[in-house]
Amino acid sequence: MRTKSYYLVRTLEEHLEETEYVYGLERDAEAARRGELETKPLSDLWDELGVTAEDEHESTV
């Protein structure tokens, strides 16, 4: 039989990478809101990738 702390440590280890990723996204989002990160309008990204309005409509149907 394993201790409660063993299961707690296992759970934390399993989710640590995901939690760090989420914190990184939150940090980047805050930096973007403060104007510290270069951003692009979504329409510019679509143009770069060759995505059209028809393509967008098809992906939501």
Image: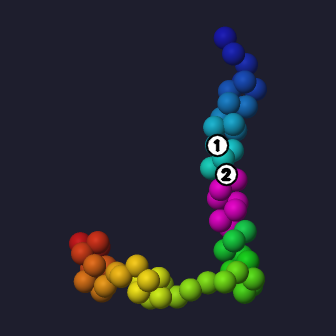
Residue shown at 29%/72% (left/top)? 59
- 25 within the magenta span: yes
- Residue 35, x across and y down, in percent: 72, 86
Q: Relative to the observer, which residue lies in front, 9 or 27?
A: 27
Residue shown at 70%/53% (left/top)? 20
Amino acid carrying mark 1 in the image: His
Crowd rating for badge 1 (residues with CA inside 10 Å; few <14, some 14–19, many 20+): few
Question: Which image quarter: residue 52?
Answer: bottom left
Are dots 1 and 2 in contact, CB under 8 Å? yes
- Residue 46, x across and y down, in percent: 41, 83
Q: Is residue 37 above or below residue 2?
A: below
Which mark, residue 19? 2
Amino acid carrying mark 2 in the image: Thr
Q: Is residue 46 above or below residue 18?
A: below
Residue shown at 28%/79% (left/top)? 55
Q: Is residue 23 above or below residue 18?
A: below
> Is disc 2 placed on a helix, strand or loop?
helix
Please identify the quadrant where the C terminus is shown: bottom left
- 59 within the magenta span: no
| Segment colored magenta | 19-26
Q: How is the image coloured?
A: rainbow
Q: Is residue 42 left or right of residue 4?
A: left
Q: Is residue 19 above or below residue 6?
A: below
- Residue 33, x across and y down, in percent: 69, 83
Please identify the quadrant where the N terminus is shown: top right
- Residue 2, x across and y down, in percent: 69, 16
What is the magenta segment's predominant secondary structure? helix
Q: Is residue 46 left or right of residue 29?
A: left
Crowd rating for badge 2 (residues with CA inside 10 Å; few <14, some 14–19, many 20+): few
Residue under circle 1?
Answer: 15
> Is disc 1 placed on a helix, strand or loop?
helix
Q: Is residue 12 left or right of residue 45?
A: right
